[in-house]
Amino acid sequence: MSLDKAQEIAPETLAQVRGSFPILAQKIGDHPLIYLDNAATTQKPLAVIDAVTRYYREDNANIHRGVHALSQRATSAYEDARASVARFIGAADSGEIIFTRGTTEAINLVAWSFVRPRLKKGDVILLTEMEHHANIVPWQQVAEASGARVVPAPVTGAGEVDLDAFRGLLQREPVALAAFVYVSNSLGTVNPVEAMLAAAREAGVPTLVDAAQAVSQRPLDAASLGCDFLAFSGHKLFGPTGVGVLYGKRAHLESMPPYQGGGDMIANVSFAGTTFKGPPERFEAGTPHIAGVVGLGAAVEWFKGLPREQLWAHEDALVRRATEGLSGIDGVRIIGTAREKVSVISFLLDAAHPHDIGTFLDAEGIAIRAGHHCCQPLMARYGVPGTARASFSIYNTMEEADRLVTAVRRVARFFS
């Protein structure tokens, strides 16, 4: 995505967006907070904070079970959020939206309820080398339980999936599922998901897209993508932590056994046996994170009301500016130089450990992440234990990008 004058965000619009986030007004020591850890979690606008507060202040009750006014209001807010999410990601209907604790639980649900019953010894679960641990470990667990194998498609030196290798594995191996990230949380690479999904469909292989990092970066349309499953976390979309979404094609969801058992997912219980509701209820056992779902619904509606194309273009310009500045510092090495990337800059400094970089920047009020970013196999691919990672969002400014570069330059001088 390129920034031109037609897309350029008006200063007053950016100021209004930024002003929606009260946490950004604080200081860290004597320095204004510069929050560049958005790939770990995004901050929350007042619209979300107010929605969660209003739920607890006015509507707090359990859902689906009461005829009293509070329970009815809470149930309506919860199901309205489901409908909002369905519209936001292009689901055919709200019954294809399951609320989970996050992307991790969503992937585990698919692993154990959809994939595990179908896995045979020798089958392959196809991933990529750039996956988050949440899209590796569950597949290793079901593979170990069934005698299947987890096989990653390789990543190039620039941080792009080798699409030819991915296609070759689909053709040569007995692949039971292909699961891959849309946007890399550690590199910012935007994967060619349309081409990957098309290749999987041609091979007759079901798919799961990890959209945790993409949900605030790209328009999502599950029906147009044609994926079988798609997962994301609310806290990556300016919503609360502890709540996420699994989209699944209805035919798949109806064929899947419950992932957990408990209240509210049953049709009838007796000691002779239990029957279960259909989706989505059968996958939402127990009292859910109601306030979190209400907050997620508020986040979706707030985000939809923004000039997103302009904000994404602004964010891309931030990344380009910071990348150019960091690249001009002696000893800095950028990890991940894909042709299409968003939000994230992962980098190393010859003279300093990533944790030292993070500590020095924190002293200047700049919040970044340092470590392996839950992508140890990817770090091993590049022969490094971890990186320093600055990740931008729609509320960051050019001044903040420049201050990041200035601060890293000071760190480089200090350790040289």
Image (spheres, helix red, strand yellow):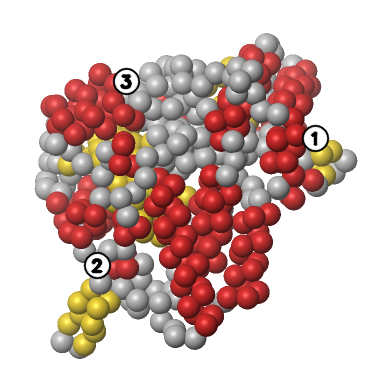
Question: Is 315 displayed left or right of 197 in the figure?
Answer: right
Q: Secondary structure at mark 3?
A: loop
Instruction: Look at mark 3 in the image and give the residue it sits on.
Output: 162
Task: Tell us which disc is closer to us: 3 or 2.
Answer: 2
Q: Secondary structure at mark 2?
A: loop
Q: Residues within 10 Å of mark 2 (few under 14, many from 20)?
A: some
| Residue 218 horizontal/vertical position (percent) | 47, 34
Are discs 1 and 2 less than 8 Å apart at CB? no
Identify the image quadrant of the C terminus.
top right
Q: Amino acid at mark 1?
A: Glu
Q: Is residue 15 above or below residue 7?
A: below
Task: Work out how far the residue at label 3 is from the one at label 2, CA to CA, in angstroms.
Answer: 39 Å
Q: Secondary structure at mark 1?
A: loop
Tell me the quarter of the picture where residue 415 sits.
top right
Task: Work out how far the residue at label 1 is from the one at label 2, CA to CA, in angstroms.
Answer: 53 Å
Residue drawn 21% across the image and 64% down it? 257
Asked whether residue 235 is in view, the answer is no
Q: Residues within 10 Å of mark 3 (few under 14, many from 20)?
A: some
Instruction: Look at mark 2 in the image and give the residue it sits on.
Output: 278
| Residue 329 horizontal/vertical position (percent) | 69, 13
Q: Residues within 10 Å of mark 1 (few under 14, many from 20)?
A: some
Residue drawn 56% across the image and 39% down it? 39
Task: Tell us which disc is closer to us: 1 or 2.
Answer: 2
Are discs 3 and 2 less than 8 Å apart at CB? no
Give the camera-side residue of 192 and 176: 192
- Ranked by sequence position, the earlier of labels 1 and 3 is 3
Q: Amino acid at mark 3?
A: Asp
- Ranked by sequence position, the earlier of labels 3 and 2 is 3
Instruction: Look at mark 1 in the image and give the residue it sits on.
Output: 364
Residue drawn 40% across the image and 34% down it? 182
Tell me the quarter of the picture where residue 209 sits.
top left
